[in-house]
């Protein structure tokens, strides 16, 4: 999931026991990767993040950008999924929230399980099928679907 140098930096910053953080959200807030939602009277205000642990955030965002270049991983698929709508820089910050996964891995003493590239396609199977049918019908085809056996 992350390279050796990134892992060393993360462990040096947060301590392998992660006892200082009661929850993954507390760790994300400390790194300043917690999502902001500022709304008042129906008006959406700035969602900018505040300065947290700058060195750890920089390492995690860089890891998020590197993950975006991977082809056969869930994190790479997540980056590409987000980059389509949010842009590459914001997608890297979103993927950097893998710090939450790191908290779980360190507290449970378990390795990370990759959900795979097809995770988003499997999750949104019906929506993808509807979009494909609509697109083919727009091109002038008549579509009938029969489930594969």
Image (tube, rainbow, N blue to C red):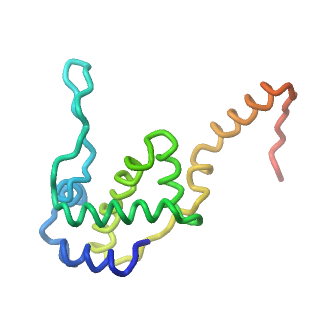
In this rendering, the answer to whether 132 lies above or below 101 is above
Instruction: From the viewer's perspective, tell me whether residue 59 is left or right of residue 117.
Output: left
- Could you tell me residue 149's position as x and y percent? 83, 53
Instruction: From the viewer's perspective, tell me whether residue 26 is left or right of residue 77.
Output: left
Q: Picture quarter containing residue 19?
A: bottom left
Instruction: From the viewer's perspective, tell me whether residue 96 is left or right of residue 80.
Output: left
Q: Nearer the viewer, residue 94 or 124?
A: 94
Q: Quadrant of the N terminus?
A: bottom left
The mark tally for this picture is 0
- Could you tell me residue 54's position as x and y percent? 19, 61
Determine the residue positioned at 22% across, 27% down: 39
In this rendering, the answer to whether 77 lies above or below 90 is below
Determine the residue positioned at 64% across, 44% down: 125
- Could you tell me residue 22's position as x and y percent? 16, 62
Determine the residue positioned at 38% across, 66% down: 63
Q: Residue furthest left?
A: 20
Instruction: From the viewer's perspective, tell me whether residue 14 is left or right of residue 61.
Output: left
Q: Residue furthest top?
A: 41
Determine the residue positioned at 21% across, 53% down: 32
In this rendering, the answer to whether 25 lies above or below 135 is below
- Could you tell me residue 61's position as x and y percent? 33, 60
């Amino acid at each position: 999931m992350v390279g050796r140098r990134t892992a060393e930096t993360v462990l040096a910053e947060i301590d392998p026991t992660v006892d200082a953080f009661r929850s993954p959200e507390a760790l994300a807030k400390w790194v300043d990767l917690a999502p902001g939602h500022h709304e008042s009277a129906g008006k959406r205000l700035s969602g900018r993040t505040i300065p947290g642990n700058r060195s750890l955030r920089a390492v995690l965002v860089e890891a998020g950008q590197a993950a975006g270049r991977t082809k056969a991983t869930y994190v790479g698929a997540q980056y590409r999924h987000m980059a389509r709508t949010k842009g590459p820089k914001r997608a890297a910050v979103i993927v950097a929230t893998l710090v939450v996964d790191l908290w779980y891995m360190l507290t449970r003493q378990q390795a990370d399980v990759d959900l795979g590239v097809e995770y988003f396609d499997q999750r949104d199977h019906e929506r993808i099928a509807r979009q494909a049918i609509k697109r083919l019908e727009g091109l002038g085809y008549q579509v009938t679907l029969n489930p594969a056996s």
